[in-house]
Image: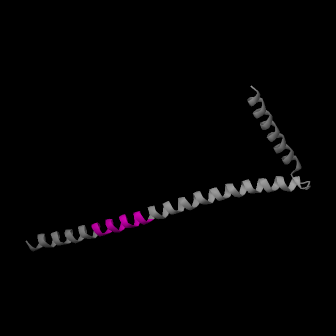
């Protein structure tokens, strides 16, 4: 009978250890999910900042060319032509 009691005690201890490990893993999983969510928010914010900086860079590049720099002159002319085409299209739509 004592052998069965020992087996039951051992089994109970193992089950308790398993429950403890499960709790720890669930806690760790929750922490990792929170960390992942935070990292995703940081990545999204940085992506938006990168896009804003790229737009600002393009604007500064065009402004620099308009001020007389020969660098990127072709890009500036293309952008101006594109804007003129858009304006012409808007005028044509208003005329109809």
Left or right of 84 in this view: 33 = left
- Seen at 81% across and 44% down, the residue is 79
The answer to whether residue 75 is above or below residue 10 is above
Q: Which residue sits furthest top?
A: 96
Q: Nearer the viewer, residue 53 or 38?
A: 53
Quadrant position of the C terminus in the picture: top right
Name the spot of residue 80 as percent of width and height, x first: 83, 43
Q: Nearer the viewer, residue 95 or 83?
A: 95
**Membership of 68 in magenta stretch:** no
Left or right of 39 in this view: 51 = right
- Seen at 77% across and 28% down, the residue is 95
Q: Nearer the viewer, residue 38 or 69?
A: 69
Left or right of 66 in this view: 27 = left
Q: Which residues are the magenta region?
A: 18-31
Quadrant position of the N terminus in the picture: bottom left
| Majority SS type along the magenta span | helix
The answer to whether residue 91 is above or below residue 31 is above
Name the spot of residue 66 as percent of width and height, x first: 88, 52
- Seen at 51% across and 63% down, the residue is 38
- Seen at 76% across and 56% down, the residue is 57
């Amino acid at each position: 009978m004592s052998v069965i009691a020992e087996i039951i005690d051992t089994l109970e201890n193992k089950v308790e250890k398993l429950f403890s490990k499960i709790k720890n893993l669930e806690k760790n999983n929750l922490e990792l999910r929170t960390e992942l969510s935070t990292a995703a928010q940081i990545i999204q914010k940085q992506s938006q900042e990168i896009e804003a900086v790229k737009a600002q860079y393009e604007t500064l590049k065009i402004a620099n060319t308009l001020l007389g720099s020969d660098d990127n002159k072709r890009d500036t002319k293309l952008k101006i032509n594109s804007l003129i085409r858009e304006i012409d299209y808007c005028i044509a739509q208003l005329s109809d």
